[in-house]
Amino acid sequence: MFESRIGRNLWHSRPRLCENQLQHSRGRLCHMLIMLIVALTLIGCGDRSSKPAADNDNPTIALIMKSLANEFFSTMADGARDHQKAHADEYSLIVNGIKDERDLAQQMSIVEQMIAQQVDAIVIAPADSKALAPVLKRALEAGVVVVNIDNKLDDGVLEQSGIDIPFVGPDNRDGARKAGEHLAKTLKPGDEVAILEGVPTAFNGQQRRAGFEDALKAAELKIVAVQSGQWEMAKANSVAAAMLSEHPNLKAIAASNDSMALGAAAAIKAAGREGQVKVVGFDNISAVQQMIKDGKILATVDQHGDQLAVYGIEQALAMLKGQAAADDRQTPTDLITAESIK
């Protein structure tokens, strides 16, 4: 009887015991959650202006280029890396590029990523002279120094956006004029010529086309076609093939970069017109140097791609140190012919 009473009491008290244990567990859980929230809050209140982890406090510069499939930009990247190695105690370098020179969305995305990584400066060869302005404005607003190389940003768009970004690069019009004048010396007035321009919205493409036109018109040559090869060898090859078919008396093709010059030279060879149609380019990549030696391409223009990014990096470093204003800086161009290569 006594045992049964004890058993009944224990049974009836069981819910209260379980409830007490549950309340105790809940209390411990709440305490743990509060401590976790406090810890996360303390972490979140840290220094949000800190830069990416690095071995020292030197600035980080991001180099953002166009297509790394283009030898010109791979040469540019190599020159920048060599410069950083020689000045490793002055700055860190991040090198970026896009696969397709027309992939504006990807280049914008890279700029956003560099802003998020809190780099100190961006040195950029924009794929488009207008489309990159908004994202570069966001970079400036985030306190990032921005330097424009290779392809100049549109002055009107910069003014409308209320931003000032220095351009460090060559006079593309003058460089193309040099190649066009050299080409004109090998032709006679009235000869038919064509121009392979780059991306039409790119300022450097516009300037190179204008430089070619300046020289060819001054020599009284007949420009029978102007079409875009989109800076690409394969596209230029197909466009040049169509030009050769449509204009059987064509005497020369002026290409706004060397990749397109190579495409045009291949089209000329396929048409069986080597020695009849001359080609000039722009950039002085190694593949074209050999073509010039072999007489397959007449000339190109060296804008010193291995140093172009370095010029921009040096400008960015000077601006970060307060030693330079956001002023443009013109870099050299040189005509490259078979004589100069020898």
Image: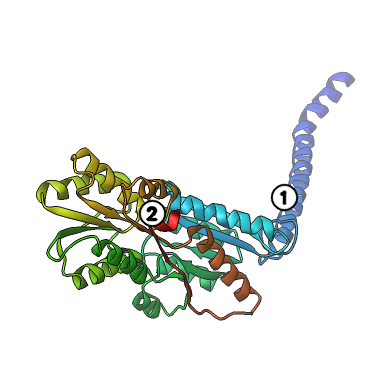
Q: Quadrant of residue 324?
A: bottom right
In the figure, is residue 82 to the left or right of 10?
left
In this view of the protein, which residue sits in the foreground, 101 or 330? 330
Task: Name the residue rendered at 57%, 66% in the picture.
Answer: 313
**Residue in the image at 69% along x and 61% along y:** 87
Foreground of the two, 1 or 215: 215
Please give the residue where the numbered disc 1 appears in the rendered image.
33
**Residue 224 tag number:** none
The three-letter code of the residue at mark 1 reads Leu
Q: In the picture shown, does residue 8 fall above or below 189? A: above
Sequence-wise first label, 1 or 2 = 1
Instruction: Tell me residue 141's x, y (percent).
Output: 52, 73
Q: Secondary structure at mark 1?
A: helix
Give residue 177's position: percent from left, percent from top: 31, 69
- The residue that disc 2 covers is 338
Q: How is the image coloured?
A: rainbow
For label 2, the crowd category at 10 Å Cα-Cα, with few meaning under 14, some 14 to 19 and many 20 or more, is some
User: How many angstroms separate mark 1 from mark 2 (CA)?
Assistant: 76 Å
Name the amino acid, label 2: Ala
The residue positioned 56% from the left and 81% from the top of the image is 325
